[in-house]
Image (spheres, rainbow, N blue to C red):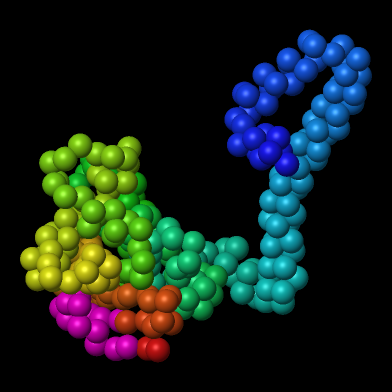
Amino acid sequence: MNDRKEMSTESYEDALERLGELLSDKSDLGNVAVAKIKKLFCELEDHKSNKSSDAVQRIQSGFIHFKTRKYLKKPSLYNALAKSQSPKFLVFACSDSRVSPSHILNFQPGEAFEIRNIANMVPPFDKTQHSGTGAAMEYPIIKLNVENILVIGHSRCGGIEALMSIEDDAAPNKSIFIENWVKIGTAAKNKIKQEYGDLSFEEQCTHCEKEAVNVTLGNLLSYPFVRERVEKGKLALRGAHYDFVNGKFELWELDVKTTPAFAFS
C-alpha cells in the first residue's frame, strides 16, 4: 500500500528512472515491460484521437442541427441573405462564451452585426492604434447604414476584473495584450474607485461593468462617422448590462449613465 502511495506522488521523470533501473537489474522483465509500454502507448494514442474526434463530431453535429432545423426550414431568408445584408443593429459584446448577443436577444441571421472583444470595449478614435476595431465599425456604419449601436456589458466580466486589479496605470504589464487593452476603460475604473471605494471588490467590479459601457459610448462619439449620424438622428447609441447570475438585462440611453431606463428580468 505504501509503495503505491509513493508511486502516486512520483514525477513523470522519477517513474521513468525507476523503470530504467528495473529493466537494467532484471533483463527478464524486458519483454513484459515492452508489452505493457506498447499497450500504454496505444491507450494514449486512442485518448488523443478520441479527444480530437469529439471536437470534430461536435462541430459536425452542430452544423447538421443548424442546417436541418434552421437553414432548410427558412429558404427564403437564407436565399435573401446570400444576396445581401441590411442589419439594423451594430452590437459590441464581450468575447465571453456566456454572453452571445444572438442567444441572449434572439437576433436572427442578418439582424445584427456583432463585434466581440475583451470587455466589450471601443477605444477612442485613432487612425493607427486599434485600427481593427475601427474597420469593424466603419463597415456596418458606413456601408450597411445600421440604425442602432448597442454596447452590452455583463456580470462577472474577467476583463473588468483585470482592469480593476491594475493598481498603478504605470506598472509593468503582467500580460502581453490584456492589460493594455482593458486600460481603455481606465476612466471607468477611476470613477468607481473614487465613488465606491468603500464597497467590496466584487461590488466595485459590478459598477465598473456598467460604467465601462458608458466610457465606450463616449468613445464611440469620437469617431466622426458615428458622431455625424448621431447628430443627424440617423444612429442611436444605447448601453446595456446582462446579468447572467440573476437573469436580468438592463438597457439605457447614452445620457442616462448607469441608471437604467428600462429593466427586464
Compared with residue 91, is residue 223 higher up or lower down, i.e. above or below?
above
Residue name at image x 17 percent, y 71 percent: 199
* Magenta-colored stretch includes residue 261: yes
Quadrant occupied by the N terminus: top right
Nearest the viewer among 86 and 242 is: 242
Q: Residue furthest front?
A: 2
Residue 42 is left or right of residue 241, and the answer is right
Question: Relative to 261, is 248 on the left or the right?
Answer: right
Expressed as whole percent of the image width and height from the top left, the position of residue 218 reads 17, 65
Residue 223 forms part of the magenta stretch: no
Where residue 123 sits: x, y (%)? 23, 53
Q: Residue 156's image quarter?
A: bottom left
Work out whether residue 188 or residue 205 is closer to the camera in this orientation and state it: 205
Is 118 drawn above or below residue 171 in the view shown? below
In the visual, does 153 lie left or right of 184?
right
Q: What's the residue at 90%, 23% (across, down)?
A: 32
Magenta stretch in the rendered image:
251-263
Residue 18 in view here: yes
Q: Is residue 180 above or below residue 222?
A: above
**Quadrant that contains the C terminus:** bottom left
Name of the residue lying farthest toward the left: 194
Based on the displayed image, in which of its 4 quarters is residue 121 positioned?
A: bottom left
